[in-house]
Image: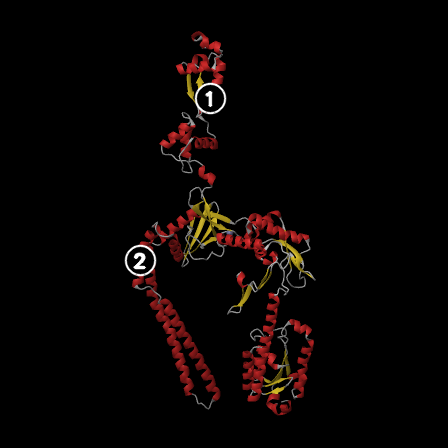
Amino acid sequence: MSSEAPQKVSASHLRRNAYLYVRQSTMRQVFENTESTQRQYALRQRAVALGWPLDRVIVIDSDLGMSGASASDREGFQKLVAEVGLGHAGIVLGLEVSRLARNSTDWHRLLEICALSETLILDEDGIYDPAHFNDRLLLGLKGTMSEAELHVLRARLRGGILNKARRGELRCPLPVGLVHLAGAGVVLDPDQQVQQSVRLLFQTFARTGAASATVKYFRQQGILFPTRVARGTHQGALSWVPLSLGRAAQALHNPWYAGAYVYGRGRWRKLADGRIRHQRLPKSEWHALIKDAHPGYISWEEYERIEQRLQESAQALGWGRTHSPPREGSALLQGRALCGLCGNRMHIHYGQRSGSQPVANYVCFGRGRGFGDPVCQSIVGTQIDIAVGELLVEAVTPMALELALAVQQEITARLDESDRLRHRAVERAQYEADHARHRYMQVDPANRLVADSLEADWNVKLRALACAQEEYQRQRSADRRGIDETARARILALATDFPAIWRDPNTPQRERKRMLGLLIEDVTLIKQRQISAAVRFRGGATKTLSLPRPLTAQQRRVTHDDVRRQIDTLLDEYTDAQAAHRLNERGMRTGAGDAFDSSSIHWVRFSHKLKSLRERLLDAGWLTGKQITAKLGVTRTALGRWRQAGRIQARICNDRGEWLYRLPDELANSGENIPIGTTDNPTARGAV
Ligand SMILES: [Zn+2]
């Protein structure tokens, strides 16, 4: 074909520019394959030989380092196509032109445009005119072969990799703690500190049974975890970082630590919008799995146990369930509670409080979760659920809906008016378009200049009209989404039924959550002195509820002031058990809602520093048995006999049955140790 070259190049080609397209697919080729680049630039001389002046040979080399597999991100190729399309190019030069584009679509498009704009194509083999069928056929074939070549190359490469991986011979990047050693394959990292850190990770997990607890332990002990730089100039360099949950989970999930050679645990998938997503595959679909391929930190059985354990805890924690459909759990705000402190979505933890029913807690783990930080905030859900439920019942009343519907009607009435106004805009655009058409028709076709400008003007007016009509229709249909009568009746009926359905104990909690989801966007919770719950309704209205903080277990035991006063009075006369009995008779309950007994009275006395009956009596001058025997000089037996005979005032002062005595008044004031028994009962003295 070179022989025909002079015939193919015409004066019209030479009037236009020559474009030299230079490309290397990867940056590596740019650096290493300089020979090819030199050859590409040398093509310039060919163009000069064919008659193009050197300054009209334009080099497009902005795509150096871009793959030819797709034209979309290659700016230079796009520019080339544009220049050819505009008829600026007389010839396109390239080393193996078919490599301009390795994608057939791009290539054929370029050929098509070259044929239309009568642009020649030149490569090292010769010169082609795409307008000629034979040349085009040849170029098309070259393009197809080039694409096929790429495909075969890739398939071979991939096939080779997969085969190698299946045999366990492909060198894969290793997790920290394992290294490739020349001649020995994969071995444990000779760095003892690295080894110990990895061992500690598995040991801690074995001890605690949870990844988060493992992370927390590392955090508390201030232990860092090793990591190796994956790529770049410092590839393989060791650095120490705080262990994060993600890193821990990755290590725990990694079968390489169990001594297994593994390839193809996941797959990259290209989405329609060009993004690439990684997808994990189940163990059965892994491309290669060779157990006991190298020394590991744990056994394969251990690895499987860990997998099992991680899966169980993931299910228990409900990870990835934050946006799930409503479930049976009692927490009403499942998936709708937001943390007011940090903005994260709150999780639900079911915990046991005094009763038998599990209580839902809304818990925000905050951003520190991955590093074992304490939770951001945790709020008992019971009260919040009740309050939000009440708010809904209140909000969805027939009256509220009636009002909303009335407003809707009012708006519809106003819309008719604005509709008329908007239609004016369309009429006006119509008039202007008609007018422009009229003017265009009037002009003498021979007067090209005027006719052209008038035609352009008419086109502009027609476009404006189309826009106006479209806008009008759009607005109109948006407005017309009003509410018809049946819908209105249905809504009102719902409002009447709503409270009944909501409060019906037979309504499953799941249904309540569904109803809640229809009405409420989300609820933002903050626990401070009080708990505030900012409820955002669908449609934008908000309402903030303030709730007292639920009492802590200790606070809940604190007895009410009034009850405390009653206890104080009772203790003037009664022992603890007797006072409890009296309170129970009066129908009083402890702070925790239980009946009183002597220990709860004892607790109240202790916590409020109230004196017991015994202390009160002693304060009032009563004496213990020991004191009075000493004072009177009588035996305990004699004292007992006197008490039984009623000769001395005595009373029980506590639940153990201890007696207190009162000195007869005449003796109490005398200040002497005069045994009263000497006159009446001489034997008593002898018994001491
Ligand atoms: Zn938070």
Left/right of residue 146 with respect to residue 463 in the rendered view: right
Q: Quadrant of residue 170?
A: bottom right
Q: Is residue 665 above or below residue 228?
A: above
Q: Secondary structure at mark 1?
A: helix
Q: Earlier in the sequence, mark 2 or mark 1?
A: 2
The location of residue 216, given as percent across then percent down, is 57, 49
Which residue is tagged 1?
618
Camera-side residue of 278 and 170: 170
Left/right of residue 575 with respect to residue 141 in the rendered view: left
Q: CA distance from mark 2 to mark 1?
A: 73 Å
Camera-side residue of 586 and 202: 202
Q: Is residue 658 above or below residue 591?
A: above
Residue that appears at 38% across and 76% down:
428
Residue that appears at 36% across and 73% down:
423
Camera-side residue of 179 and 64: 179
- Name the residue type under label 1: Leu
* Badge 2 vs badge 1, beta-carbon distance below 8 Å: no
Please tell me the numbered disc located at residue 492: 2
Disc 2 crowd rating (10 Å Cα; few below 14, some 14-19, many 20+) is: many
Q: Quadrant of residue 567?
A: top left
The location of residue 644, given as percent across then percent down, is 40, 16
Q: Secondary structure at mark 2?
A: helix
The location of residue 629, given as percent across then percent down, is 48, 15
Left/right of residue 125 with respect to residue 466 in the rendered view: right
